[in-house]
Image (cartoon, helix red, strand yellow):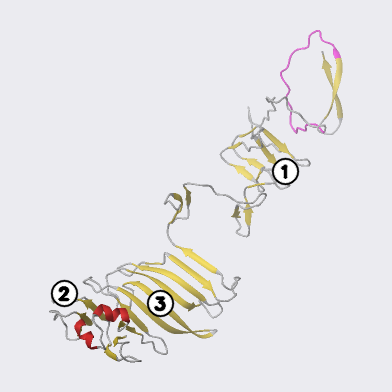
Amino acid sequence: MAATIKLRTRRGTATGSVKEIETSAPLGVVLHGADEDKARPKGYDSVLWLGNAEPEELGPKDFRLDPAALASLDGVASLADAIASGSLQIGPEAALGVNGTISEFVFPSLESNGARHSLVIESGVFNDAAGTYRDNVMRLGWNTGPDAAAGETRAGFQLESKFRQTGADPFLTEYIFLWQSADGLINRRPYQSSVQHAAGNGRAAGFVDHTFSGEVNFQSSASENNAIWRDNGDVLMQRGALTHNSNNAAWLRQMNAAGTSSVTLLYLDEANLVRMPTTVRADAGILASVVKGIAGGELVLGEPSASVTVAAANFFAKSVYIANGYTLQYSGVGYVRAAGVLNLQDTAEGPVVVGTAGLQVAGAMRFGTHSAVGAEAITGYITITDAGGATRKLAVIS
């Protein structure tokens, strides 16, 4: 990189007179005034000293400028006046070649290893299957230049004008925060954002993509903790609620075991009932207490494919409703008093009611307890249907 110091006056002449000092190495600047003991900044081959005293650490490649001498530049009275009027301009001169080189503007540092802040401008030409393009990069940070000090961390912000993974991909403009460990073995991008130049890969032109790495803390304007998205993927809610602003929308989904599609888990339908469109299985017990208005305690299954499977556990429910055309299947588990027995008991709301089609039981059905016949007489009968479908009459003894 070539650094150029220009001393320009805008007084006295229309175009101004220009004097230049050039150096091909990074240039440091020291405003030392009358202090000849001012320390020379480290990490620079050349230093510009601005002051009226002779610096004791003036190097062989250094430059010295006495502010008083600026008075001879068409009446510039002081260094402050020169800077304010634009007569003194200090800055880098980019040296970017046709195929891409690097230009760096460095800032003074007191680090003994030479690490310092810098502004790096880089331009490179890339070739891929779609052709040749130029990518321009600006990087502002600590120890991120081409002469970065070894054994020191690197951190900075990078703006990349045009980049693509392959020739088949659209161009992206990228904004990246960078970090590298002192040993160079750990590289992180805490935040990265990109904007897509043209449509492609299923995304429209102007599509914005953000990537956060590591643990992300969400806070209120008053710095109160709201939620933490942890590095292991967990989300910890500390305040507020997880809310979906639509009714009867299947918004909570999870991938199925085959990995072919997502399955809806729970949502609130148009009747304000919690729906479970898929099978619900309770391997270690489930307490059914799905609230429906002030009545409460109702588990409603009405979807054609909906079912509740209870394996090796008890299922407690105030009431279970089965939609017309569907069945309640029992296989030895459920609300039990003995193995293989289904007990239908009175509730606080009244007795168990069986529909007009009757209750069909493949095995024996138990009613109350047996008592020996006394002096009672047969007063009538009850008609039942046996397992074979034949109508039978059961005598009633009063």
Q: CA distance from mark 2 to mark 1?
A: 86 Å
Q: Badge 2: how crowded within 10 Å, few (<14), some, or many (20+)?
A: some
What secondary structure is marked by label 1?
Answer: loop
What residue sits 57% from the left and 49% below the top?
243
Q: Does residue 318 show up magenta in the picture?
A: no
Q: Which mark is residue 138?
A: 3
Q: CA distance from mark 3 to mark 1?
A: 61 Å
What secondary structure is marked by label 3?
Answer: strand
Q: Does residue 361 show up magenta in the picture?
A: yes
What residue sits 78% from the left and 11% below the top?
373
Q: Amino acid at mark 3?
A: Met
Count of all numbered marks drawn on residues in the image: 3
What residue sits 45% from the left and 76% below the top?
160
Q: Badge 3: how crowded within 10 Å, few (<14), some, or many (20+)?
A: some
Q: CA distance from mark 3 to mark 2?
A: 33 Å
Q: Earlier in the sequence, mark 3 or mark 2?
A: 2
Q: Amino acid at mark 1?
A: Gly
- Tell me, yes or no, whether the two marked residues, 3 and 2, touch with CB atoms within 8 Å: no
Tell me which segment is drawn in magenta. Answer: 357-378
Is residue 65 visible from the viewing direction of this image? no
The residue wearing badge 1 is 302
The rendered magenta stretch, by its main secondary structure, is classed as loop
The residue wearing badge 2 is 38
